[in-house]
């Protein structure tokens, strides 16, 4: 069962300036919710949302005749995934991430198609992980390793610089930062316990680009992996 956010759109091809990577937020909330079984998934009059979407990558600079590469779109944040069940049966054969609300992958920056000193677009940042709300009365079977997953999304790669330049440097775009982890709330109705786990840690920064004709874009930033056993 998945509530994973969508992947950001890739930048379109369009300079001496490369595109910067989009910034990523570490998570989607920092407040613990009340310990209760009946939860309307609202905060006041507002619906509780999932992870924050990643920022889009910056577009490269342009010259009078050639556009730089466009930045990739940020990955969507993970959704809210609520499951309320009397019995959950799990075991060693249960797949890792069987219940997931992960952030979406950032879009790739574009490489410009024209001739000149034009750079590549920055990669979009990965979206933050969402929120899994799991309420149950009986947990049957044995431990399922890494069954719950609210990891962030991987950042997008930066676009390469223009294939053909003139006298100045062409620079690829920076890679997008990986998305941070989300949160999980486990409500054990049989034991009358509520536990909330938060993975508010940012993903890795994207790689720096190379320069020169076809200068390579920066590598994608790794997502923060946030999983729990069930």
Image (tube, rainbow, N blue to C red):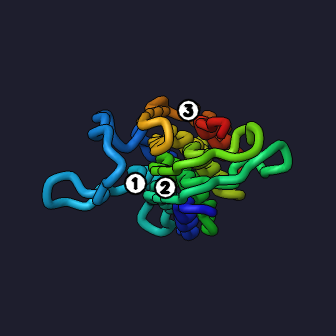
Image quadrant containing the C terminus: top right
Q: Specify few, some or many for label 1: CA neighbours under 10 Å numbering under 14, 14-19, or 20 or more.
A: many
Q: Residue at x 61, y 57 (%)?
A: 108
- In depth, the one of 207 and 100 nearer the eye is 100
Q: Secondary structure at mark 3?
A: loop
Please say whether residue 23 is visible from this viewpoint: yes
Circle 3 is placed at which residue position? 205
Q: Residue at x 58, y 43 (%)?
A: 151
Please say whether residue 20 is visible from this viewpoint: no
Q: Are marks 2 and 1 in contact (CB under 8 Å)?
A: yes
Give residue 217's position: percent from left, percent from top.
65, 46
Q: Secondary structure at mark 2?
A: loop
Give the label on residue 95, or none. Answer: none
Q: Quadrant of residue 23?
A: top left
Closer to the N terminus: mark 2 or mark 1? 1
Q: Quadrant of residue 29?
A: top left
Circle 1 is placed at which residue position? 50
Q: Residue at x 46, y 50 (%)?
A: 133
User: Which residue is farthest left?
Assistant: 45
Q: Specify few, some or many for label 3: CA neighbours under 10 Å numbering under 14, 14-19, or 20 or more.
A: many
Q: Secondary structure at mark 1?
A: loop
Closer to the N terminus: mark 1 or mark 3? 1
Image quadrant containing the N terminus: bottom right
Give residue 86's position: percent from left, percent from top.
55, 57
Alpha carbon distance from label 1 to label 3: 22 Å
Q: Residue at x 31, y 35 (%)?
A: 32
Circle 2 is placed at which residue position? 78
């Amino acid at each position: 069962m998945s509530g994973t956010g969508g992947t950001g759109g890739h930048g379109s091809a369009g300079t001496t300036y490369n595109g910067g990577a989009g910034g990523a937020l570490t998570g989607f909330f920092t407040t613990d919710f009340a310990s209760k079984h009946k939860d309307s998934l609202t905060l006041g009059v507002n619906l509780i949302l999932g992870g924050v979407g990643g920022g889009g990558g910056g577009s490269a600079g342009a010259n009078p005749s050639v556009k730089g590469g466009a930045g990739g779109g940020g990955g969507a944040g993970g959704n809210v995934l609520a499951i309320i069940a009397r019995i959950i049966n799990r075991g060693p054969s249960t797949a890792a991430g069987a219940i997931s609300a992960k952030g979406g992958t950032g879009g790739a920056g574009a490489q410009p198609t024209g001739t000149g000193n034009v750079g590549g677009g920055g990669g979009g940042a990965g979206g933050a992980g969402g929120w899994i709300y799991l309420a149950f009365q009986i947990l049957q079977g044995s431990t399922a390793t890494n069954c719950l997953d609210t990891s962030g999304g991987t950042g997008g790669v930066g676009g390469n610089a223009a294939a053909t330049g003139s006298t100045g440097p062409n620079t690829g775009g920076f890679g997008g930062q990986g998305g941070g982890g989300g949160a999980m709330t486990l409500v054990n109705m049989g034991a009358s316990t509520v536990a909330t786990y938060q993975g508010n840690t940012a993903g890795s920064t994207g790689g720096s680009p190379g320069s020169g004709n076809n200068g390579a874009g920066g590598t994608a930033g790794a997502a923060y992996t946030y999983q729990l056993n069930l």
